[in-house]
């Protein structure tokens, strides 16, 4: 009897153990959106393409697969007219936070059935916001790429230079104090940082107003390209100074490159990333290699 017990204990240790997945499947299914890219027949780049998704295409995230790539997981999804496939979590957003999905999707604006009023407020995002309010004052666009921080009496307390925008935020910098701000409309927070320190919440945003008639300029040109794997490439060309670009590739995050001398076309580089624009196509080089993308 004692020998049988020893065998049972040994069997418990020697039997094959099911590998632990990168993340549990308890939060699925749930709604999600894509930032663009190919849908594959299995969880990995080695599987063949079975479909394509474009930026903001919606679908149902069915399961996490446990297969990781560059810090994000592959997920099984249901998209289109009921087709199923797999897409990488680095190109997804989800309805609720999930550790191996890039981010939470921005809330959609509710549908309005009644006719629009002439003075109806337009949806506010990082691209069109001109005023941001909080309990201790506000931030207001002042022109020339500058923002003013106003106190509760409406007086200017500090000046900031706008550095960048994306769909969710405006990024400001005060060089005199080495203070960085992020007006995060998605999380409804004004984030504050000094020097190279990480940003922490400073104020809760209570309201924001969009620029109803945003200024346009030939010095700023926004272009969209399509790259291998169906990935979108968004490039904003700025003709200020010597010229520079902001672009997002394989991620909504933006990277800035300064223009450098080139024999033909326009070349932008920081030594790690480079983008060579010529005609209707661009060649983009990243630490992962070089891709050629074409104008949409």
Image: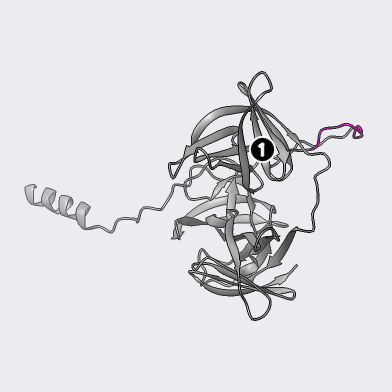
- Corner quadrant of residue 138: top right
The one nearer the camera, 95 or 234, is 234
**Image position, residue 62 (x, y; %):** 57, 51
Q: Is residue 170 visible?
A: no
Magenta residues?
115-122
Dot 1, how many residues are within 10 Å of its Cα: few (below 14), some (14-19), or many (20+)?
Answer: many
The one nearer the camera, 222 or 118, is 222
- Corner quadrant of residue 224: bottom right
Counting labels gives 1
Q: Residue furthest left?
A: 2
Q: Residue furthest front?
A: 176
The one nearer the camera, 125 or 26, is 125
**Image position, residue 120 (x, y; %):** 86, 32
The one nearer the camera, 95 or 200, is 200
Residue receiving disc 1: 147
What residue is shown at x 62% (from left), y 77% (from top)? 262
Secondary structure state at the residue bearing disc 1: strand
What residue is shown at x 74% (from left), y 74% (from top)? 280
Q: Quadrant of the C terminus?
A: bottom right
- Corner quadrant of residue 267: bottom right
Would you say 176 lies left or right of 78 here? left
What residue is shown at x 58% (from left), y 32% (from top)? 189
Q: Is residue 227 magenta?
A: no
Q: Is residue 117 magenta?
A: yes
Q: Reply above or below: 77 against 171.
A: below
Q: Main secondary structure of the magenta part?
A: loop
Would you say 105 lies left or right of 99 here? right
């Amino acid at each position: 009897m004692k020998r049988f017990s020893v065998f049972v204990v040994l069997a418990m240790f020697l039997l094959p153990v099911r590998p632990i997945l990168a993340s549990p499947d308890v939060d699925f299914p749930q709604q999600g959106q894509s930032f663009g890219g190919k849908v594959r027949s299995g969880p990995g780049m080695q599987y063949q393409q079975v479909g394509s998704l474009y930026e903001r295409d919606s679908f149902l995230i069915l399961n996490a697969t446990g297969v990781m790539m560059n810090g994000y997981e592959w997920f099984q999804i249901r998209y289109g007219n009921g087709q199923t496939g797999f897409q990488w979590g680095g190109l997804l957003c989800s309805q609720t936070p999930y550790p191996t999905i890039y981010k939470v999707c921005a809330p959609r604006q509710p549908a309005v059935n009644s006719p629009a009023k002439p003075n109806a407020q337009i949806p506010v995002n990082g691209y069109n916001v001109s005023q941001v309010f909080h309990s201790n004052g506000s931030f207001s666009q002042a022109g020339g790429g500058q923002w003013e921080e106003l106190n509760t009496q409406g007086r200017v307390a500090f000046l900031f230079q706008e550095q960048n925008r994306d769909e969710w935020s405006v990024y400001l910098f005060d060089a005199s104090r080495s203070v960085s701000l992020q007006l995060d409309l998605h999380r409804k927070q004004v984030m504050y940082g000094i020097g190279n320190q990480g940003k922490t919440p400073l104020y809760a945003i209570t309201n924001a107003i969009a620029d109803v008639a945003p200024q346009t300029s030939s010095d700023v040109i926004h272009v969209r390209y399509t790259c291998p794997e169906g990935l979108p490439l968004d490039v904003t060309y700025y003709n200020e100074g010597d010229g520079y670009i902001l672009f997002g590739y394989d991620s909504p995050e933006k990277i800035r490159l300064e223009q450098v001398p080139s024999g033909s076309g326009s070349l932008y580089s920081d030594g790690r990333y480079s983008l060579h624009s010529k005609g209707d196509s661009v060649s983009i080089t990243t630490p992962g290699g070089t891709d050629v993308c074409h104008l949409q």
